[in-house]
Amino acid sequence: MINNATLVLLLLTLRSCASAFAFGATGRSSMLTMDTGEGDFAFRPQLLQQHQSTMPPLPTRLQTPSSRQHVTDEAQASSIGMPWTESIDPSQELTFMPFWDHQMKFMTSQLTNLQAMPVTNKEGTEDFSITVGDKKNVRVANRSFSSSQFRKIRMTYYDAGPQAQVFNSLWYPAPEYNLPLLGIDLLQFHGGKKHLAVVDFQPVQETEEQHAAKYEHLMQPIRDQYPALQGHMSKRFYDENQFFSKQMLFARFEDESIVSDSLAPAFTQYLDTYMDLMNAQETAPDGAQQVLERHEAYDIYSAHRDPALHMFKAKFGEKWADEFVHEFLFDLSR
């Protein structure tokens, strides 16, 4: 989302300011004209995992090594302490942790055969479940899942106290479902003074007629309810005509009440609608290889344009960042 932001986060003077958010909170929303590419941080973790169900053979180079076995959900969750209840800087609230929590509960109730997957590089030698920066002022947690309907669902929470709060997730349908990816990117900076939000059903096919036109009418009634989320991207990092729908929820805003008034309900409605779309879709095993190849194209496109790579290098080291981006976030990118 995904589909969905810049490199200057490390150059900004960041203020400590607590933010308040709950799914039940109320307030006044604002209508803003939005743009992307000039924000504080671009963080688009779109993730892939080889689908485990029965299907025609796919190219060997796209297959996940057989040594990467399922791990228990309980073990993975406890190992990183998720959901966190307190930021790495106690003065800052975990702004988007309710979104993480809601998605986890949604997945548990809606997906069949949900299983936690390893959160490692391809060789299994680097564990990305949780990483803390050398200065102990930033941490990033990751989880990965598969189910009967999805070959990989990836979740990331980046906690840098008042500097940045980020929740990102990407849902990859099983290849026999010719469906969009669900991309979620929610970012907050300066203790709640700046925000960037992207939620989208990200098309993987190359033409509107092949793909996006088949489902955008389901998204439009939701998007129409939230003027504050009707912004448009610039082309600084991404081309909105590639792998983005015309009904993408997009916003850059300063009014923190938009998080509770618009973003939270729109997020839950998009989740519900996306799952309805999945449940109504028939499988097409004969097209699975072509869909997976489009997932690979998406990974390559995203990995080469993700400006967060530079931030990861600065915070966690070059080797870690390179493997994290190319072997976990976009693991079909090379």
Image (cartoon, rainbow, N blue to C red):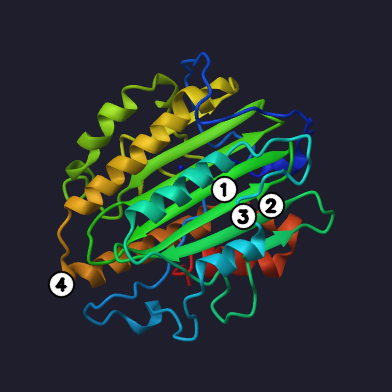
Mark 3 vs mark 4, CA separation in Å: 39 Å
**151 or 298, which is in the foreground?**
151
* Residue behind mark 4: 286
In the image shown, does 242 or 26 lie closer to the viewer? 26
Residue annotated with mark 1? 43
* Mark 4 / mark 2, whichever is N-terminal: 4
The mark nearer the N terminus, 1 or 3, is 1
Q: Earlier in the sequence, mark 3 or mark 2?
A: 3
- Tell which tag, 3 or 2, sits nearer the viewer: 3
In the displayed structure, 292 sits above or below 186; it is: below
Q: Residues within 10 Å of mark 4 (few under 14, many from 20)?
A: few
At a point 51% along the width and 13% down the height, the residue shown is 28
Label 1 to label 4, Cα distance in Å? 34 Å
Residue 42 visible in the current orientation: no
> Which mark sits nearer the N-terminus, 1 or 4?
1
Residue depicted at 36% across the width and 43% down the height: 271
Q: Residue furthest right?
A: 135
Q: Which residue is mark 3?
A: 82
The Cα–Cα distance between marks 4 and 2, rounded to whole angstroms, is 41 Å
Mark in front: 3 vs 4: 3
> Identity of the amino acid at label 4?
Asp
